[in-house]
Image (cartoon, rainbow, N blue to C red):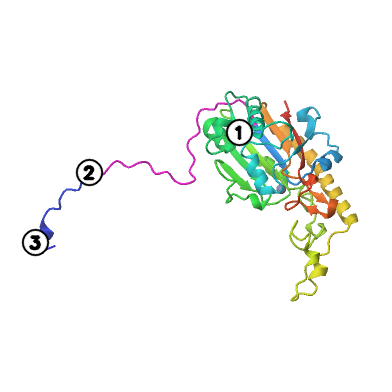
Amino acid sequence: MGLFDMFKKPAPKPAPKPLRPLVRPGALPPHPEPQADNNFIIVILDSCRYDSFMSAETKHIAKLSGGKVEKRYTYASWTAPSHYNLLTGLLPHTSPEHVYASEYYKEDFFNYNQRLGAKGIEFAKMVPGLWFPELLRNQLGYKTHARVSLPVLNPKTGINRAFDSFQLMDSHNDMASMLPTLTFESDRPSFYLLNVGETHYPYAKPDEDSSMWPRISGVNGVFRKMNDQIDPEHPDFKEEFQFFDQDKLDQLRERQIDTVRYLDGVFEQLYDLVPKNTHIIVTADHGELFGEAGYFGHGPIMHEKCFEVPYLEGMVR
Ligand SMILES: [Zn+2]
């Protein structure tokens, strides 16, 4: 460019093309008009295996279902994949014989019409995202919320999609502290996922001093076969990974049952505070092993007690 060129008027710029609105990743679209009548709550008792739930002989929890508690089976043996699956809308299954999976999914999904007080819900509406909170929020107009106890479900994980609010609670074992955070609106229904941690190892009620918790070395479910390994750098390794003896495992199972008894009172409070037209499901994400076949905990375990979970649903009023 020469010296005089600097004084020339710049050539007019072509008119800018109209900008498309920017889509921010993670941003949620506005809620449509509500298309369903009922609030919907799913409570996951983390690690609560079916027979622990039954041994607790709760008075309040099964009011929802007229006392009926089903034994169902989870699709996954640990927390993260199990919650992911639940949020695709697939609840613990009944293991039906002589039925194609696709037929079972379709039928199971159709029940959401009754649960939610809605019409026209079918599995095809989930395509392509296959994500139930998205259907609830973006098609049916729900406010969508999660309150979780286990850090593997924290809000930075992939589970947090299409939620209006998603909170990892301060304590891993305090369902009662979730209750004041639940709000319901008069002009649109709400969905809540509540992941409850009292029933997870170390099976502790919120007021129990953590110094009284049972101790294990290593990570839950990982150290099962470590007795066979010896690290030459750490000759004491073998002692550190001694497995619980059966007495201790029986005590741990009693502790899990006791947390369910305690939670019965918290459910009574939950049922008191929810509005009319609230459909509630109570279940677990997987079971737990207490010494059967040499296993403890859940996760990398192929055993029926890891897959048996309680399942009940209904409305309180
Ligand atoms: Zn879990």
Segment colored magenta: 16-39
Q: CA distance from mark 3 to mark 2?
A: 26 Å
Q: Name which residue lies at 84% across and 55% down.
A: 294
Crowding near pointer 3: few (<14 within 10 Å), some, many (20+)?
few
Residue under label 3:
4
- Determine the image quadrant of residue 162: top right
Q: Which mark is residue 190?
A: 1
Judged from the image, the secondary structure of the residue bearing numbered disc 3 is: helix
The structure residue drawn at horizontal position 70% and vertical position 39%, both measured from the top left corner, is: 43
Along the polypeptide, which appears first: circle 1 or circle 2? Answer: 2
Q: Main secondary structure of the magenta part?
A: loop
Along the line of sight, the residue nearer the viewer: 208 or 159: 159
Q: Quadrant of residue 212?
A: bottom right
Few, some or many residues within 10 Å of mark 2 (<14, 14–19, 20+) = few
| Residue type at tag 2 | Ala
In this view of the protein, can residue 55 be seen by the observer? yes
Q: Check residue 106 for magenta coloring.
A: no
User: Any mark on residue 15, and which?
Assistant: 2
